[in-house]
Amino acid sequence: MGLYLSERIEPFYQRKDFLFGLPNVGGLVKTKPVYINGVKIGQVSKVYFDPRLNGKIIVELSIVEEFPIPRNSVARIFSEDLMGSRAIDIILGNSGNSLKAAIPSSPIPKLP
């Protein structure tokens, strides 16, 4: 999974958008939450097929909390509740470089 960063400034808050590609999203849909250490920091903003038609699904995350995410962090899809609702959990790495300053095409691995 590659995770990419771009920043957009909204009128009332600053939002960072992350993109990554997966072969299967397992029921993850728009508006599902994104967490770091159990704290909701954003939501899934889009889920769509890769325009290059390579079979991957692109997931866009919209992060509204100002939180530095280390470059070697990983993102995983998990079941959020007993009904099987899907969500994203970002597991923070220990890199001194945050994604905020990372090159936009720098991939971040997906947990097995």
Image: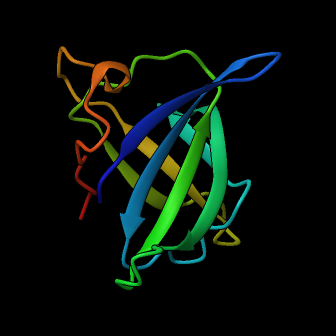
Left or right of residue 49: residue 30: right
Q: Who's the residue at 58% across and 56% down the image? A: 87
Where residue 110 appears, x then y in whole percent? 28, 57
| Residue at the extreme right of the image, as rendered | 12
Residue 101 lies in quadrant: top left
Quadrant holding the N terminus: bottom left
**Would you identify the image quadrant in which residue 97 lies?**
top left
User: Whole-percent x and y of residue 71?
Assistant: 24, 30
Residues 100 and 82: in front is 100
Left or right, residue 46 beside residue 5: right
Asked if residue 46 lies left or right of residue 88, the reply is right
Residue pictured at 29% horizontal, 54% vertical: 2
Asked if residue 90 is positioned above or below residue 68 in the image, the reply reads: below
Looking at the image, the residue that sits furthest to the front is 52
Q: How many marks?
A: 0
The residue at 60%/76% (across/down) is 27
Report whether 31 appears left or right of 56: right
Horizontal and vertical percent for residue 22? Answer: 38, 70
For the C terminus, the image quarter is bottom left
How far across and down, in percent of the image, does residue 79 sit? 55, 64
Please name the colour scheme applied to the rendered image. Answer: rainbow
Q: Residue at x 40, y 56 (%)?
A: 20
Q: Compare residues 33 and 79 and report the one nearer the observer.
A: 33
Q: Is residue 74 above or below residue 59?
A: above
Question: Relative to residue 7, is residue 80 depicted above or below?
Answer: below
